[in-house]
Amino acid sequence: MSKPKILVVDDEQYIVELIRFNLEKEGYTVITAGDGKIALEQTFREKPDLIVLDIMLPGVDGLEVCRTLQRDKETQLIPIIMLTAKGEEIDKVLGLELGADDYMTKPFSPRELVARIKARLRRNFKAQQSDNQEKENILAIGGLKIDIEKFSVYLNGQKVDFTPKEFELLKLLASNPGKVFTREYLLEKIWGYDFAGDTRTVDVHIRHIRKKIEPEQGEKFVETVRGVGYKFREMA
């Protein structure tokens, strides 16, 4: 697994090289920029995982770079650690208000900067994992939302009550849009091999599900495959 890519933006070359040396020693990929215009170009082209951004830059300053990146959906989630000269309290506050995640005052300890970068990337990674997990736990199809973790179903924002078997049946179908399931398979999967019933049990539950999530003039989600079974509609 490749190490994250860090963009270092500063017009003082020795600072850029100092940061680059310490980051590359940790295995990170480092790209650099000496002014705000190039920093923006690099960000949109390279999509770095984090930006170390000096406030005092020629042309477009660090605050304007931060403001621009926060306005764009493609870049607004990239963590930014701002570098400020000693005593620039107003700039620190402005930077944080504009969306910077952290700041360090020059002169700074390279080891502390690397530690902060690691900590920020860890937090970002955990946040992404949490977000991905949340997305995986929710199925959204048209006006229908199925919260797998909470065993809840919502139609156009309104909660719909489901029995446990109805929920399991809906979840299985919705998790596999376009896939045709035979009645026999659904009976065995949802009710178990030892269930003493016939495939009409599946038909009854499908009918109940349709009544709950398919109003007369509303969206249709569950399709009957004649002579075979059922499938959940594929999204266009």
Image: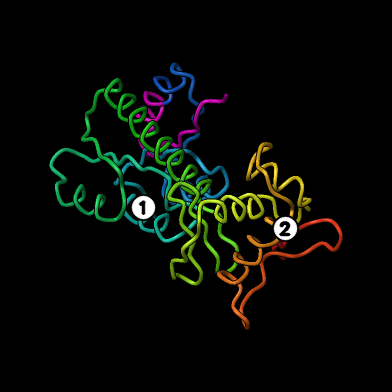
Residue 67 falls left or right of residue 193: left
Q: Is residue 159 magenta?
A: no
Q: Does the magenta stretch include residue 12?
A: yes
Q: Where is residue 113 in the image (x, y as percent from the top left)?
A: 30, 27
Q: Quadrant of residue 188?
A: top right
* Kind of residue indicated by mark 2: Arg
Q: Is 138 located above or below residue 158 in the figure? A: above
Residue 44 falls left or right of residue 210: left
Q: Give the range drawn in magenta.
A: 1-19
* Kind of residue indicated by mark 1: Cys
Q: Residues within 10 Å of mark 2 (few under 14, many from 20)?
A: few
Q: Determine the CA span between mark 1 and mark 2.
A: 62 Å
Return the residue at label 2: 200
Return the residue at label 1: 66
Q: Where is residue 152 in the image (x, y as percent from the top left)?
A: 46, 56
The secondary structure type at the circle numbered 2 is helix
Front-most of residues 171 and 38: 171
Residue 28 falls left or right of residue 178: left
Placement of the C terminus among the 4 image quadrants? bottom right
Placement of the N terminus among the 4 image quadrants? top right
Q: Quadrant of residue 19?
A: top left
The secondary structure type at the circle numbered 1 is helix
Q: Where is residue 147 in the image (x, y as percent from the top left)?
A: 48, 53
